Amino acid sequence: MKKHILAFSIAVAPVFAFAAPSTNTINFQGEVTDQTCDVTINGNASNPTVLLPTVSTMQLAAAGDTAGQTTFTIGVSGCMAPTTTAQAIGTVFVGNQVTSQGNLGNTGTATNVALQLLDPQSPSSPFDLSSAEGYTAAGMSLPVGATSASYDFAVQYVAEAGAATAGSVLGSVQYAVTYR
């Protein structure tokens, strides 16, 4: 009898292991829209890189100092032309390695420096990327009858915790274009 109970216990144990609560969940998210466009960064559709100028550590000598503002253009093309009103297009930026101040953390060798994203038309208000949903930037609009549009954004170095030290500065951001 003991052998049957032992055999039953061994046979049933794996079933109970699979019934335990699991944190191995995959979430899927998507969107269906009546508008789609091809998206480019500075005219490049794949693996875009925005090169910032080399700046001196003296330009980033104190917390809050900024330098090297560099413009980049997000463009859309191949869109269906709006027929009655312009279509607003938002750009959502979700940062990788975001700092406590909402900037893109540096994964390079320089210290006390991060990257700020901003709209060059309002440079005193950098994008705060600290939200899990990222930052949605307005600005782009697809005019009536047009099939393409573009909008300029910018990135710059910022000293966050005091004087920056020399070294490489690397950061990345994910982006998505939303049609409204």
Image (cartoon, rainbow, N blue to C red):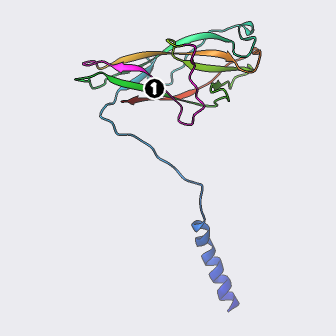
Magenta stretch: give its range. Answer: 123-146
**Where does the image place residue 125, in percent across and percent down from the top left?**
56, 18
- The residue drawn where x is 67% and y is 28% is 99
- Tag 1 secondary structure: strand
Task: Give the main secondary structure of the magenta stretch.
Answer: loop
Q: Is residue 136 above or below residue 152?
A: below
User: Total marks drawn?
Assistant: 1
**Where does the image place residue 153, in percent across and percent down from the top left?**
50, 16
- Of the 4 image quadrants, the one containing the N terminus is bottom right
Q: Residues within 10 Å of mark 1 (few under 14, many from 20)?
A: some
Q: Is residue 71 above or below residue 79?
A: above
Q: Nearer the viewer, residue 141 or 104?
A: 141
Relative side of 111 to 90, left or right: right
Q: Quadrant of residue 170?
A: top right
Q: Quadrant of residue 36?
A: top left
Q: Residue furthest left?
A: 83
Q: Which residue is mark 1?
A: 91
**Where does the image place residue 136, in percent across and percent down from the top left?**
48, 28
Q: Nearer the viewer, residue 170 or 69?
A: 69
**Where does the image place residue 60, in percent across and percent down from the top left?**
72, 11
Q: Looking at numbered disc 1 in the image, what kind of residue is underneath it?
A: Thr
